[in-house]
Image: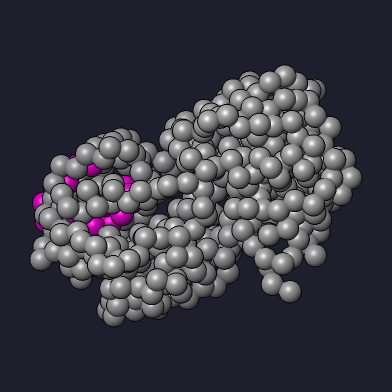
């Protein structure tokens, strides 16, 4: 039976308690793997999560000419020569981050061609920011059938303003700018921790980047990058999922390796909901229930605001909060696929425009639900852990793309969950 046909079976109603460590960041690891195209030398990445998306990205790089070895949580990439600048559409369409090969291919070979990327269907994520940056660096951008093509006889540094702080757009343009001649300034850049990590990785490979983690990134182009060994940061979204599962079940959960300053928005909302939260760099983040949760309002906005990738899990936890809670989605226009699935468990939840309204506290009851994307799947898992009785979560292939050991981690926290 394939993973998409398998299911998680959850016996809910048990408070989660205990301490776990999360895997390396899914998103940051994907960016780091794409960076391997920028050098002919070997890039060694550690703390890489063992998830399906990593395998997809590795296979894409192999098609482009890279040698990629995966051994546990270590990935080694060497690309002495790029042999293909137009990856097959069927591979690109499986993974949103696949479009990140465009910047390295353009920087290293002067050309790249790619269909618009795939991934979860959670709303429109236009490529305009990528193309604005490439054009400002001196590339020509054109459309050829289903493919986008970028070409340049030589990239030159420029002052680039983004209309929107796109994460993938910032990383892709950064990849191109590090090998461009001269100085580049990226204004309204995405300040996410994963973007800042990508910049630090590039610096470890010989790039000259400052301002990472802020809306203004400065880049002095270099002639070539070299190999490096680099550790991927912990996954704040995985950490947030387990902390919210603890909140939903009235538990006491500690993420030992979570980075508190990456998660200020979630920590603030957990405290608003009535949780006691201890957070420091040495011991991570611990969130302890103190009785019934209280309703809150949340705005899902770009970092450092509340992460859109934690919106569905937060909504699941809010079903256990007294009062009327609201989540306002400001990033993706189709993030609320999870709502009908939560209703199957008995949640009183409705959508209105870009907002989700949750009436609690609701006694959820186990049912059969489906993971419709990575975070929608995490939402029904959180709700299933809080529900009375047995919940069956179908479509868990989505969860395999984002969580390296969801079952094992939740079992370590005392959850009754099996994969069948």
Q: Is residue 83 above or below residue 244?
A: below
Question: Residue 6 sits in which quadrant?
Answer: bottom right
Q: Quadrant of residue 8?
A: bottom right
Q: Which corner quadrant holds the C terminus?
A: bottom right
Q: Position of residue 216 (x, y in %)?
A: 26, 36
Q: Residue furthest right?
A: 389
Question: Which residue is at 30% across, 77% downward?
Answer: 84
Q: Is residue 405 left or right of residue 68?
A: right
Q: Would you say residue 317 sits in the magenta stretch?
A: no
In the image, is 252 to the left or to the right of 132? right
- The answer to whether any part of residue 11 appears in the image is no
Q: In this view, does 331 lie above or below 46?
A: above
Counting from the top left corner in percent of width and height, residue 342 is at: 72, 41
Whole-percent x and y of residue 49?
56, 60
Does the image show residue 409? yes
- The residue that appears at 84% across and 45% down in the rendered structure is 366
Q: Is residue 343 above or below residue 271?
A: below
Image quadrant for the N terminus?
Answer: bottom right
At horizontal 45% and vertical 38% (from top left) the residue drawn is 331
Tell me if residue 144 comes above or below residue 269 in the rendering: below
The image quadrant that residue 327 belongs to is top right
Is 150 positioned to the left or the right of 66 in the image? left
Residue 125 or residue 388, whichever sits in front: 125
| 368 or 275, nearer to the observer | 368
| Nearer to the camera, 92 or 51 | 92
Give the magenta-colored segment's residue range: 169-186
């Amino acid at each position: 039976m394939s993973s998409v046909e398998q299911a998680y079976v959850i016996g809910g109603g048990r408070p989660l308690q205990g301490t776990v460590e999360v895997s390396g960041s899914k998103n940051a690891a994907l960016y780091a793997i794409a960076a391997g195209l920028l050098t002919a030398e070997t890039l060694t990445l550690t703390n890489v999560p063992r998830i399906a998306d990593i395998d997809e990205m590795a296979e894409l790089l192999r098609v482009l000419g890279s040698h990629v070895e995966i051994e546990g949580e270590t990935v080694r990439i060497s690309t002495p020569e790029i042999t293909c600048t137009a990856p097959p559409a069927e591979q690109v369409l499986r993974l949103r981050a696949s479009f990140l090969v465009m910047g390295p291919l353009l920087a290293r070979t002067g050309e790249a061609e790619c269909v618009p990327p795939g991934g979860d269907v959670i709303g429109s994520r236009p490529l305009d920011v990528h193309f604005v940056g490439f054009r400002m660096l001196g590339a020509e951008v054109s459309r050829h059938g289903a493919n986008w093509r970028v070409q340049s006889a030589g990239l030159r540094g420029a002052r680039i303003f983004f209309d929107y702080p796109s994460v993938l757009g910032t990383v892709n343009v950064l990849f191109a700018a590090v090998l461009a001649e001269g100085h580049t300034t990226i204004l309204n850049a995405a300040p996410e921790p994963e973007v800042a990590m990508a910049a630090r990785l590039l610096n470890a490979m010989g790039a000259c980047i400052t301002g990472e983690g802020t809306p203004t990134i400065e880049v002095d182009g270099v002639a070539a990058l070299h190999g490096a060994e680099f550790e991927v940061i912990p996954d704040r979204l995985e950490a947030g999922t387990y902390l919210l599962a603890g909140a939903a079940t009235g538990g006491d959960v500690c993420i030992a390796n979570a980075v508190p300053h990456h998660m200020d928005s979630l920590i603030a909302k957990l405290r608003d909901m009535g949780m006691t939260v201890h957070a420091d760099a040495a011991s991570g983040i611990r969130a302890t229930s103190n009785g019934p949760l209280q309703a809150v309002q949340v705005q899902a906005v770009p970092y450092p605001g509340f992460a859109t990738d934690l919106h569905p899990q937060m909504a699941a936890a809010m079903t256990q909060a007294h009062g009327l809670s609201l989540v306002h989605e400001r990033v993706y226009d189709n993030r609320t696929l999870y709502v009908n699935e939560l209703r199957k468990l008995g949640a009183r939840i409705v959508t209105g425009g870009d907002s989700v309204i949750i009436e609690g506290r609701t006694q959820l009851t186990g049912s059969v639900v489906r993971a419709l994307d990575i975070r929608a799947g995490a939402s029904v898992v959180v709700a299933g852990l809080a529900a009375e009785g047995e919940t069956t979560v179908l479509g868990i292939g989505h969860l395999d793309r984002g969580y390296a050991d969801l079952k094992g981690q939740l079992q370590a926290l005392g959850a009754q969950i099996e994969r069948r």
